[in-house]
Image (tube, rainbow, N blue to C red):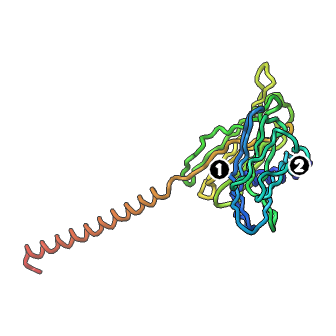
Amino acid sequence: MTSAQFVFYLTCLFLEIMAQVTELKSSSSVLQESDFLSVNAGDEVTLQCFYERQTGTATYLYWYKQSLGQKPRLISSFLIYDEKGDFYEGFKNNPRFTLDTGNGKNHLKISDLQTLDSATYYCVTTSVKFKFAEVITVSVKGSGLNIPAVIHESESETIQPGGSVTLNCTVHTGTCDGEHSVYWFKDSEESHPGLIYTHGGRNDQCERKPNTQTHTCVYNLPMKSLNLSHAGTYYCAVASCGHILFGNGTKLDFEDEVDSLFLVYFLSGALTFTTILVVLLAFSNKTNSCRSSGNC
């Protein structure tokens, strides 16, 4: 896979993870929370998927699994009028995978998690049209290679317009000596999520701890002359040794405009009041002067 193709797939993956719930135009809509789950090997997880049932339609719900760099694989199907769903090749008769269906839900439960369960899981609905709902990405931490990516910034950063900030992404590669790539994504309400910057294929910003095989790499994303268009959540993603992991993200906010508007209105009102007061005082002073001199 070329680097350009990988960036494309990674961008698609991020779009799927961070996309907001889309209203489906088919007769049955799926309501599912966007999420990124980091769990330990041996644990269990329930991937929730809700739907709104409407009469007179035959709607199927599916679960798909897509591992990094692979095509989606069909896990299960469920007809909303049935009591239970069906599993397919690779998942059929596998006790680790179970469905909790009916009453407006199509939940997929995975027990005894393994590193091979790390993937993006899609809940899909179809009646007339085939529609992808929100997706859930599961990252299973086990005894194998893990590439944790940590963004050393507060969860929420308040900035003044015109100010600057530097986001940090510290990568601990453990025993993985291969080159890794770091990607920065932005997600905001005003624009679609997307890739904004990448540090690719270089380890020149890394240091090896003495007497260990651990590499620590620090990547910075400086941002200057910020304005409201920069508001949003910034995510660091690390790809190395066949693994990919997103950081928790740093949310950049700007100072509340309400306070600024209140200050503008207050100062404008104070200026208006002062102006009127000066005019009244001048008029009163002139009137008093006229009365004293008798020339008015």
Q: Characterize the local packing of mark 2: few (<14), some (14-19) or many (20 or more) Cα atoms within 10 angstroms.
A: few
Q: Is residue 174 visible?
A: yes
Q: Nearer the viewer, residue 53 or 280?
A: 53
Q: Nearer the viewer, residue 19 or 205?
A: 19
Circle 1: element type: strand
Q: Are marks 2 and 1 in contact (CB under 8 Å)?
A: no
- The label on residue 90 is none
Q: Is residue 240 left or right of residue 284?
A: right
Circle 2: element type: loop
Q: Mark 2 belongs to which amino acid?
A: Tyr
The x and y percentages for residue 44 are 74, 37
Q: Nearer the viewer, residue 250 or 278?
A: 250
The residue positioned farthest toward the bottom in the image shown = 296
Find disc 1 in the rendering and name its residue: 233
The residue positioned farthest toward the top in the image shown = 211
Q: Residue at x 84, y 50 (%)?
A: 86
The x and y percentages for residue 213 are 81, 24
Query: Which of label 2 and label 1 is nearer to you?
Result: 2
Q: Residue at x 78, y 60 (%)?
A: 125
Q: CA distance from mark 2 to mark 1?
A: 37 Å
The x and y percentages for residue 117 are 82, 40
Q: Mark 1 belongs to which amino acid?
A: Thr
Q: Is residue 195 visible?
A: no
Asked if residue 102 is positioned above or below residue 245 in the image, the reply reads below
Q: Characterize the local packing of mark 1: few (<14), some (14-19) or many (20 or more) Cα atoms within 10 angstroms.
A: many
Q: Name the N-terminal-most of marks 2 and 1.
A: 2
The image quadrant where one finds the C terminus is bottom left
The x and y percentages for residue 96 are 81, 38
Asked if residue 45 is positioned above or below residue 82 in the image, the reply reads above
Q: Residue at x 55, y 54 (%)?
A: 161
Find disc 2 in the rendering and name its residue: 88
Asked if residue 146 is positioned above or below residue 257 in the image, the reply reads above
